[in-house]
Amino acid sequence: MRSENRTRWVILGCLTLEPMSGYDVKAFVDRTIVHFWSESYGQLYPTLKALEAQGLVTGRHERQEGRPDKRVYTITEAGRAALAAWLAEPAEPVVPRYEHSLKIFFGASGPPEAALDHVRRLREESAAALAAYREREVEVEARLGDSEHAPYRLAVLTGGIRYAEAVLAWCDEAEALLEAHAPPGN
Amino acid sequence: MRSENRTRWVILGCLTLEPMSGYDVKAFVDRTIVHFWSESYGQLYPTLKALEAQGLVTGRHERQEGRPDKRVYTITEAGRAALAAWLAEPAEPVVPRYEHSLKIFFGASGPPEAALDHVRRLREESAAALAAYREREVEVEARLGDSEHAPYRLAVLTGGIRYAEAVLAWCDEAEALLEAHAPPGN
DNA sequence: GGTCTCATGTAAATAGTTACATGATTTC
DNA sequence: GAAATCATGTAACTATTTACATGAGACC
């Protein structure tokens, strides 16, 4: 693998916002960057331990009443430096694997309506995603205000919105194209 | 992993077009669907063997002059049926991991100009990709003509074009946003 | 003489997900 | 009484990449 364990950078990035537990990081990822990133506990907890061993974060046990204790991690100066260095490097252009596209690409080998169904499902998924992003946009604008993080977060969120809009427009185009060549026989 | 070995479906899909060797499949992927899919030899060759063992493809040794012999695989009826069944199933919505977005998202923790640099590099990469797609579009239209595959392939290629266009438009938007909030000090 | 293309494969390593285990408290 | 939330972790498994090994012929 080209870049060793990208989970570490996600964790360090989250910890620059505030001290968090593994559970908190997971919740943050699922709430804010889930449209372009995902993390699993199976990756988060071991990586947190490794980061602590490397001195990039420090963990402390925190007692809680009425709920389980948690282990809260804080980023160290070394952690901030490592993150800053990684942020300065060009991003690795990773080729994503889109099953939707793959299934449409080989559509001629499937049942007649299958490719159109993929387009229609994609439209529904994208419409739902778009609605969620727009809600989040309002929320982020309100909560972040003029924080130093605001422009970065808003830029990325706008990216999600533009992406979803482009996919929706493409769905119409693709549907027309496929319908024209494979007239519905039912 | 939810879907067992998606490489198999790529191989079967390719073999519906014509009999191919592992090397041919790799070349086809890199030539036509590389913008949303990638395959490595380390995955292709073992999977081809497994598919043969399952009776979904048959391989034959082909002698060549002036170049190495090759092993050419042909899809069987069972292979076509398996592929058609997979194509009929809804695609699994896999969350991609965009390093570009991640680095911009946490931009406040990096060097001042870093996030803008990511946007600018992304613009260059997308512009190059867009140019390549447009060339391929002309080529595909000419070569596929009114083949049964044409509408599917063109639809997917158009998807790549729309995506690249949307990214380019977003880059302008993001650059303006980031410049407004983090005035260039150099 | 060096590099590129053609061609097949294996081994080692890593990345990542899923399932399991545990258990208290809160909400429906 | 059931299900969800909070909370941490491990083990098993799968997917996937990268590096290595081999070797002939074509091209510059």
Image: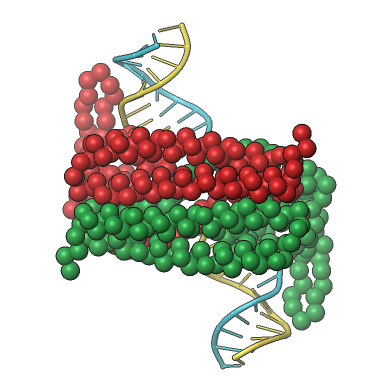
Chain colours: A red, B green, C cyan, D yellow
* Residue located 63% across and 44% down the image: A175
Q: How far from the left and from the top, in percent, is residue A80?
A: 22, 53
Q: Quadrant of residue A38?
A: top left
* Residue located 32% across and 55% down the image: B174
Q: Quadrant of residue A3?
A: bottom left
Task: Say if A101 sits above or below D23 in the image.
Answer: above
Q: How far from the left and from the top, in percent, is residue D2?
A: 47, 11
Nearer the observer, A44 or A179: A179
Nearer the observer, B5 or B20: B20
Q: Is residue A81 left or right of residue B164?
A: left
* Residue located 60% across and 38% down the image: A120
* Residue extending furthest toward the left: B185
Q: How far from the left and from the top, in percent, is residue B172?
A: 35, 59
Residue B104 visible: yes
* Residue located 28% across and 44% down the image: A14
Q: How far from the left and from the top, in percent, is residue D18?
A: 50, 64
Q: How many marks?
A: 0
